[in-house]
Image: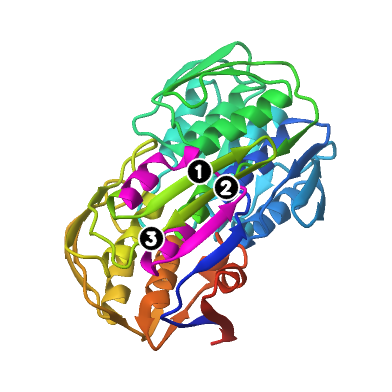
Amino acid sequence: MDKLVITGGARLSGEVSISGAKNAALPILCASLLSSEPLTLTNVPCLNDIGTMLKLLAQMGVKVERDGENVSLDASGLNNPEAPYELVKTMRASILVLGPLLARCGEARVSLPGGCAIGARPVDQHIKGLLAMGAEVAVEHGYITAKAPRLRGARLFTDMVTVTGTENLMMAACLADGETVIENAAREPEVVDLAQCLVSMGAQISGAGTDLIRIRGVDRLHGASHRIMPDRIETGTFLCAAAATSGDIRLNGTSTGYLDAVVDKLMDAGCELIGEKTPRHESIRIMAPARLKAVSIRTAPYPAFPTDMQAQFMAINCVADGTAVIRETIFENRFMHAVELQRLGADIKIDGNTAFVTGVERLQGATVMATDLRASASLVIAGLVAEGETHIERIYHLDRGYEQIERKMGALGAKIRREKA
């Protein structure tokens, strides 16, 4: 098992390219199940979760061809509408095959998903929506089994804002009979990216990016080509790393347009951010002050502050002037990184879903353990500013969502290396 070793104190500078978004790529890979014609994707990140999804699709009969960031998927030979526990257990996004399989094959058997241990993420909204569309659904022996000769359009209201639920139901509705309306839909850019891909395949979708999405079902979808959007969470993570180290970096292939809430908070902390756009190129430059000001945050569904950036902001607040209040409203178990940051000398107090972070003069290197994907990123940021060496263990979490983070951070001047634990 690998670990990262970071020697703190280096100021980040230079430029690096941002990868495609994992959280956009995963549902779009599943969209290939909806058509018997090839789907060609570019800007697909090279991550463990992507590899797992491609294995899952391949065992269903999808022909998968991959060349770096380019992936071609041909589901004309789809013959096994089942997602087994062995492939699903490590990745919650596997649930996204449920809707497309049911719509295309009339049946699906999908293991209940796993993923990071950051709190309950139930799939009841997925099931509720499919039931409303006429499916027969049962949950038995750890599997969701669903059947429907053809789904029917319906008016769907989710009890909570759910990104994967919105995506699953939107994909299922593309081949349903009649119109489906999803109310209280997730508004994330990744939902919009999926909708744009589906439209390029012949789907009739309007309202993506709002809380009401309309889908008019069609008889079939055709092949298409699509470029995956940039990863806004990787973008935000690198911006926080630069902020913590008083850095000056440029991130290429990404945009501030996906990150309004994060950009606002970084500016409140004293950073200057400049978005640049030409017909062929987008980038963000961040210039950080010698010492940040503490910024309080409250997580909430998009377009509010993203829960996936909460841990990174906790890390930068550890070395900022003042006290920040961080309220986590999405997941009930997403402060596990606080204990590890305390091992580095951070002053953090937890009260339920609220953390009080008072900045200290400096952090000190120590051995810490990654507990989930974004917690891993917060430990990397803290390690960059800690005195001495920080050893981050269990970084397989990190590899699920960040493509070669040690290479990219190293290109910006970080003293970071991967070792066998």
Q: Which mark is residue 275?
A: 1
Residue 177: % across, % down: 63, 13
- Pointer 1 and pointer 2: residues touching (CB < 8 Å)? yes
Residue for badge 3: 288
- Pointer 3 and pointer 2: residues touching (CB < 8 Å)? no
- The amino acid on which the numbered mark 3 sits, given as a three-letter code, is Ala
First to last magenta residue range: 238-267
Residue 401: % across, % down: 55, 59
Name the residue: 28% across, 49% down. Answer: 268
Q: Earlier in the sequence, mark 3 or mark 2?
A: 2
Name the residue: 54% across, 87% down. Answer: 421
- Pointer 3 and pointer 1: residues touching (CB < 8 Å)? no
Residue for badge 2: 283
The answer to whether residue 414 is left or right of residue 217 is left
Q: Nearer the viewer, residue 326 or 156?
A: 326
Q: Residue furthest top?
A: 178
The answer to whether one can see residue 163 in this image is yes
